[in-house]
Image (tube, coloured by chain):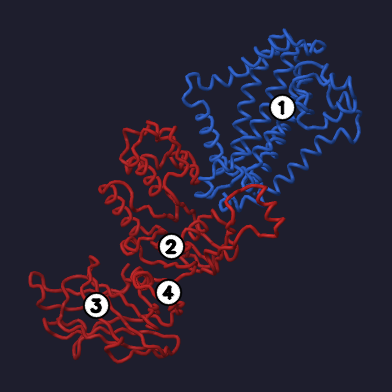
Amino acid sequence: MANKDLAVKVENLTKSFRIPLEASNGIKQKIINALKGRKGYREFTPLSDVSFEIEKGDFFGIVGRNGSGKSTLLKTLAGIYSPDGGAVHVAGKLVPFIELGVGFNPELSGRENVYLNGALLGFSRKEMEGMYEEIVDFAELHDFMEERLKNYSSGMQVRLAFSIAIRAQGDILLLDEVLAVGDEAFQNKSKQYFKELKSSGKTVILVTHDMRAVEEFCNKGILINDGKIQARGSNEAIAIAYKDLFEAPSPDKKRDVSPEVSTVKDIAVSMPDKDIDTPVAPGENITLNITLESSCDYENDVVLGINLKNSSGLLVSSFGLGGDAEPPLKISKGSNVYSFDIGNNIFQDDQYTVDILLVDYVDDHRSVLHESLDNKAFRSEGFKGRQHSLVHIVNYKKRT
Amino acid sequence: MKLSNILSRKNRILLRELVITDFKLRYQGSVLGVLWSVLKPLFLFAILYVVFDQFLKLGRDIEHFPVYLLLGIVLWNFFTEATTQGLQSIVARGDLIRKINFPKYIIVVSGTVSALINLLINLGVVLVFILVNGVQIDLTALLVIPLILELYIFALAIAFFLSSINVKFRDVGYLWEILLQAAFYATAILYPLQMVASQSVSAAKLLLMNPVAQIIQDIRYVLVTDQTLTLWNFVQFGWKTFIPFGVIIVISILATVYFKKNSKKFAEQL
């Protein structure tokens, strides 16, 4: 792979199937079809010309409804299906979990099943021995490992399978709809583990129809519909596209996603007539300047939205420019500076992130032109014990 | 399916786990367990001895006929077991193939390897009977090793071929069962090949062109009695001698190519 930081690269992936028109799988039907000059199948293309990249350390969401092609994509990523066109490049060891407990045998003990499952995933006995304790710990099944699997409750089986899935030491973890597993306590534990995974820098690909899971765990993703990528970018961008696509359906007005025309170059907070390091009194005006670098003139009306979040991810405030009520916002080639008047000083002693979303409205359909990931942040420091009184703002470099 | 991949560490691990699992599950729930692998040929011998030696008096002119018979049946059973298990293997493990990507040939190999292990256990029992019967065994008995290898390769090639056809046409299983039944009687296992030869020499020669017949007769020759008719002592040395081996080579090549071509699509077709 050309780029060293890429974990997965999918290029112009196309996959189609032949769906037999008759259910029977025999020679008789084949002969009848040949005699009648029928093909006996119809061509079905669940994926056409799909391209995307996943960087190392991404928690990447692939969202789509049933029949959207996401499962086909997943199986092609896992190497189960071979592509008809295009290619899938994977850097490192990809551990797929299409379904929990694949190859589990009810007649074998829990321990034997762990090793068998491991072998199927490509781990040696020695590697599995290294992971075994952790798996059992996570599943909380110490006293049951020598029991046969058929004596496990279904919850216990799922816990064991899930523990193998998330403890398996691969470079890339490919998960399919596995979040709703076990009782509530186990679910919380799993969620906790996903958050750890997210911060640990391991590459995870999560395939799901559950938009909330994507919003909660993923930093990036794609929305897939009718075998095409409908939206790509941050989880917020995906969430918006998902809502537009499914919650207010307007199927005849679908529009391809426009290419990214611009990038955010700089975000700066400033105050009129004041130096950036001076304390700001409550009520004093604060302005947020966003510099956008565009590769071309963009004629359509666009909406620029800003979400301001504090360090625990809570939305503090959001603003927008453009749209119906305001003068239209245009992007011209080169640098564009947009200013937001934040008004009253709302900052506390915390670190804030700025999420930017640039959206184009065409025929009631939104398409995302640009979104920033939450890597731009700044810090505001207030006086201890006297919140809301005086704040001084320091621009903060990229959050690491 | 590069040659280096076939024996890669990862694939060997998987093969081992699958074979172990298969063997663990084979006698699951039975009290005697693996002992049945030994008991089966033992009882088979008892039956053959009573039927053929005491009542039918079929193989009077062949010494140690019950052992001769047992050896043939054990080898044939291996061929049947390896090919039918191989044939079913891909479809039977469909749930795995649809969910995990791993080399598909491992499944077929694991099905045949457990049949091979069974054969080795059975041969151990047969060997005891051979010695008890007072057969003199010399170093030529070691020829059994390449002969069993030959039988295994033939069975494996057929298993590869049939297992991939079976994905598309489930009729293959039934068809193969019938073919095996016919082949069983055409392979001179229950009766001495001399019986055929006394009626028609060319028919007996034709029967020896079947690789399984060639192998079974050869193994009988080296292990039981040199009265056995084989390709070497019955068919005049010439191009015909190579037919059984040619058949194996051609089928192996065709099966490998066919399996390799089709295995990519197994996950979709299952």
User: What residue lies at 80% left-to-right and 13% top-to-bottom?
Assistant: B62
**Colour that chain A carries in the picture:** red
Left or right of B237 in this view: A257? left
Chain letter of the residue beneath label 3 in the structure image: A
What distance separates the C-alpha of mark 3 from that of mark 4?
Answer: 30 Å
Badge 4: few (under 14), some or many (20 or more) residues near its Cα, within 10 Å?
Answer: few
Quote the CA–CA distance across marks 2 and 1. 52 Å
Q: CA distance from mark 4 to mark 2?
A: 35 Å
- Kindly indicate whether the residues beneath marks 3 and 1 are on one polypeptide chain: no
- Position of A270 compared to A74: left or right? left
Q: Residue A312: image x %, image y %?
A: 23, 65
Amino acid type at circle 4 is: Pro
C-beta proximity under 8 Å, tags 2 and 1: no
What is the distance, in whole Å, between disc 2 and disc 3 at their CAs? 30 Å
| Mark earlier in primary sequence (3, 4) | 4
The answer to whether one can see residue A203 in this image is no
* Same-chain check, marks 4 and 2: yes
- Establish whether labels 2 and 1 are both on one chain: no
Residues packed near mark 3 inside 10 Å, few (<14), some (14 to 19) or many (20 plus)? some
Q: Secondary structure at mark 4?
A: helix
Residue pointed to by mark 3: A318
Q: Which residue is mark 2?
A: A56
Q: Earlier in the sequence, mark 2 or mark 3?
A: 2
Give the spatial CA distance, label 1 vs label 4. 69 Å
Q: Are marks 2 and 3 on the same chain?
A: yes
Chain B shown in which color?
blue
Residue under label 1, please give it.
B145
Could you tell me which residue is drawn at 32 percent across and 44 percent down?
Answer: A138
Residue A94 drawn at (x, y percent):
48, 54
